[in-house]
Image (spheres, helix red, strand yellow):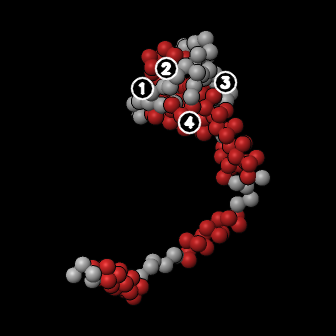
Amino acid sequence: MQKSLPYLAILIVLIYAIYNAKFRHVKKIETKTVSNYTKHIKEHTTSHYEEELLKLQTTQYARQYIINVINHGSKQFDFKGGEMEGGFASKKDAPKIACYVLELSGKQCKEPYPKDAAMFYSSICAGCHGDDGKGLGGTYPDLTKSKLLGIEKREMFLKSMITRSK
């Protein structure tokens, strides 16, 4: 019995291989997906990095960036003052605060921020960023700059990726 055990194992592996070859069907890749991707490649004259670099300059991008930092924190940005935890404000209040912060840097949201946005900023953000948004002695990011620090870092990253890909 011990001598036949290796042969039995080989026989089982062979039967399994034959079964898979005969009865198992590999899913075909949808040609529609491939053709959509090919069409997408032909239509794009710029890279996705370049497209995002153009979007960085928009108020909408800045607004969404601020909302993301309020909701999720700033650990990934490695700020001098340390990380900002996410969730200091509710997800409902984050857009209000974002529009208020944009006004500090001279930008405006499509819809004006509600009156209570300044109160939210003062009670939640001003402790680190100051009432004027300048960042309490440079320790925390200055929110009055035309480009916020995290967006500047993203811009540098995108430019480096574009340079590498050429």
Taking the image as shown, residue 19 lies to the left or right of residue 71, namely: left
Which residue is drawn at the image coordinates 61% and 67% (left, top)?
37
Query: Amino acid type of disc 1?
Result: Phe
- In space, the residues marked 4 and 2 are separated at their CA atoms by 15 Å
- In space, the residues marked 3 and 4 are separated at their CA atoms by 14 Å
Q: Nearer the viewer, residue 51 or 25?
A: 25
For the residues bearing labels 2 and 1, Cβ distance under 8 angstroms: yes
Write down the residue under mark 1. Answer: 88
Write down the residue under mark 3. Answer: 145
Judge whether residue 156 can be spotted in this image: yes
Mark 2 or mark 1: which comes first in sequence?
A: 1
Residue 82 percent location from the top left of the image: 52, 22
Query: Amino acid type of disc 3?
Result: Lys
Q: Please state, as top left, top right, bottom left or bottom right, where the N terminus lies in the image.
A: bottom left
Q: Residues within 10 Å of mark 2 (few under 14, many from 20)?
A: many
Q: Residues within 10 Å of mark 3 (few under 14, many from 20)?
A: some
Query: Amino acid type of disc 4?
Result: Tyr
Q: Residues within 10 Å of mark 1 (few under 14, many from 20)?
A: some
